[in-house]
Image (cartoon, helix red, strand yellow):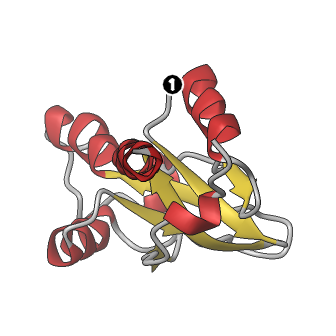
Amino acid sequence: MNTKVKEIMNSKLETIKPDATVYDAIEKLVDKRMRSIIVLPKDDKDVYGVITVRDIVFKILSKNLDPHKIKIEEIASKPVISIDKETELGHLIKLMEKFNIARVFVHEGRELIGVVSLLDVLSATLIERARRY
């Protein structure tokens, strides 16, 4: 597979500040119908993080915790796993399998510019195979 991740990535990324509440994240996720939000670094020494629907359901809602009282930084996963936009699809798939993850972020330099999910990989694979026939 010679497809590059930049060709299949979703460039719609939502961000949230680490000191926002989990409730703020829930509003964004539901409003935008997304499954994850990038957590911005606190400062120059910090790194990007991610918060997912799964994080919120399992770490907050299932434990009956109040999403208005918990900050994003308390449950965000850091650092995010990201790859260069020129990475080939085959390498991306191996990375997702190795880390057992459903999404990988795409960077250009130090900036996150997109995300690739398992569904994006599946779609790209179908399209690539269809082109051969």
x, y percent for residue 46: 77, 64
| Residue at image point 50% right, 62% down | 8
| Residue at image point 34% right, 46% down | 119
Secondary structure state at the residue bearing disc 1:
loop
User: Which residue type carries mark 1?
Assistant: Asn
Instruction: Pick whichever, 92 or 30, lies toward us.
Output: 92
Numbered label tally = 1
Where's the N terminus, which quadrant? top right
Residue 105 falls in image quadrant: bottom right
| Residue at image point 16% right, 43% down | 61
x, y percent for residue 42: 68, 72
Image: 70 above or below 11: above
Image: 111 above or below 1: below
Image: 14 above or below 45: below
Q: Is residue 65 left or right of residue 2?
A: left
Where's the C terminus, which quadrant? top left
Residue 32 falls in image quadrant: bottom left
Residue 39 falls in image quadrant: bottom right
| Residue at image point 62% right, 54% down | 3
Q: Name the residue under label 1.
A: 100
Q: How crowded is mark 1: few (under 14 residues within 10 Å), some or many (20 or more)?
A: few
Q: Can residue 21 be seen in this view?
A: yes
Q: Is residue 110 left or right of residue 62?
A: right
Q: Is residue 79 visible?
A: no
Instruction: Pick whichever, 67 or 90, lies toward us.
Output: 90
